[in-house]
Amino acid sequence: MKVFRVLFLLLAFIGTAAHAKPETPPTQEINRIVAVVNDDVIVQSELDAKIKLVREQLQAQKTPLPAPKVLRRQVLNRLITQHLELQLASKNNITVDDHTLDAAMRRLASQNGMNLTQFRGALERDGYDYKQFRDEIRKQIIIQRLQQRMINDKVQVTSQEVDNELSRMAASGQSHEEYHLAHILVAVPDAASPAQIQAAKRKAEGILQKLHNGADFREMAVAQSDGQQALKGGDLGWRKAGQLPTIFANIVQKMKTGQISGLIRSPSGFHIIKLVAKRGEQQHVVTQTLAREIVIKPNQLMSSAQARKELGKLRQRILDGDDFGALARAHSDDKVTAANGGSLGWVNPGQLPPQFQQVMDKTKVGQISQPFQTRRGWVIVQVLDRRKHDSTKDYRRARARNLVHKRKAEEALNLWLRQLRDDAYVKIEPHDNT
């Protein structure tokens, strides 16, 4: 089995990233410009490499391949968007250093059960240029950081929006449901003329008719959709009810598994969705820890080593019978917890920094940890108790906030990408087979 298929989830993560080594056509074809994107160009060799990779992705998914000219158009549009985002990232001085990139590569290798040397060898055996693959990972991280800065960090979610989301989910009776969706979009440009809108509608109606006549949804998405997930067969993955795009939410909750919607109109065009599957939510039970701490911070008069030694002395006094709470109030440099005898209260998993959580999890009930260093200083933690806690209510509220944020960010991203394309100078050169 080719490593490519083993790495399918990886390649889905990085989009159409890794440059496979294309078959070598005549030199003038390799260097031919296929599109101009502002002051940048996309050349034939880059397009060929992307097409080859996407073709293998679709084959790994067992998705029928569209006509070559259709696949070419979809991949070229994706490349244009990538170039525009990278140009904007450069203008905003968004970069990825080698240390961050190396860590990302090691994570990707580990996720596929390999070390970095094995990962590189596997890619190269299947014909992928490791240096180009690495460079494309850098590009994808840059694009993620750009989208985070331009979109995600600017999306605000109010408590009222969370309350409204919870009320909407409860009223729908589907608050525990998750939906696996597939999607086709026939886009219309901004400020489209009535003729353009009618042409897009006729195209969408034609697609819908073919689907009703038995056409494969994934194949139609790859061949016809203008959506961001077109080259993945339109697969939107699993979505919570509150994570559904606003225009889909009420429709999806009334659909049966396997059902295909009618045309759904939005400012971006005409949508068709398919409910692939749905599932319910289980009770969310976590292990909470009741703990307390003492913190000693190094300062100008006390070195880090001295702070650790001082904390060790306090730990020994507690083991010899002194009261933890009294010593915390008298000596701890975290004034918030010190006022309560060092109490952290009942702590949920993930509530504290990973290093602190790791030490606390390893400490048995009734025991006191050895001093360990954190950003706040040197710390000892005592675990007083543990319990199973049904945090479903808290979990649902946190989830509702995340879903509202993700939905708003996704809608903002789609509009932002359209605007980015509309504001750019893009010229697609004529192609013999188009």
Image: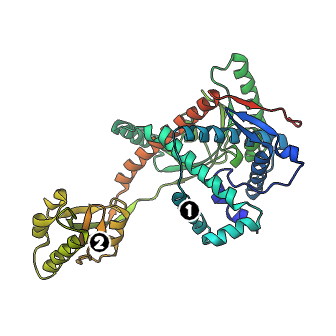
- State the CA–CA distance, disc 2 to disc 1: 28 Å
Q: Nearer the viewer, residue 304 or 285?
A: 304
Check the image and report above or below for 154 versus 8. above
Type of residue at label 1? Asp
- Identify the image quadrant of the C terminus: top right
Residue in the picture at 60% in, 26% down: 267
> Which residue corresponds to the image point at 23% horizontal and 62% vertical from the top-left?
344
Mark 1 is surrounded, within 10 Å at the Cα level, by few (under 14), some (14 to 19) or many (20 or more) other residues, namely some
Tag 2: residue type?
Phe
Do tag 2 and tag 1 residues touch (Cβ < 8 Å)?
A: no
Q: Earlier in the sequence, mark 2 or mark 1?
A: 1
Of the 4 image quadrants, the one containing the N terminus is bottom right
Give left or right: position of 315 versus 399: left
Q: Which residue is mark 2?
A: 372
- 259, 318: nearer the viewer: 318
Nearer the observer, 28 or 371: 28
Residue at point 56% right, 41% down?
Answer: 90
Q: In x, y percent, where is residue 336?
A: 18, 56
Instruction: Kindly state the secondary structure of the residue where label 1 is placed.
Output: helix
Q: Quadrant of residue 67?
A: top right
Q: Which mark is residue 102?
A: 1
Who's the residue at 53% across and 55% down the image? 97
Q: Nearer the viewer, mark 2 or mark 1?
A: 1
Horizontal side of 35 relative to 144 (left or right) equals right
- 330 left or right, relative to 24: left
Q: Quadrant of residue 115?
A: bottom right
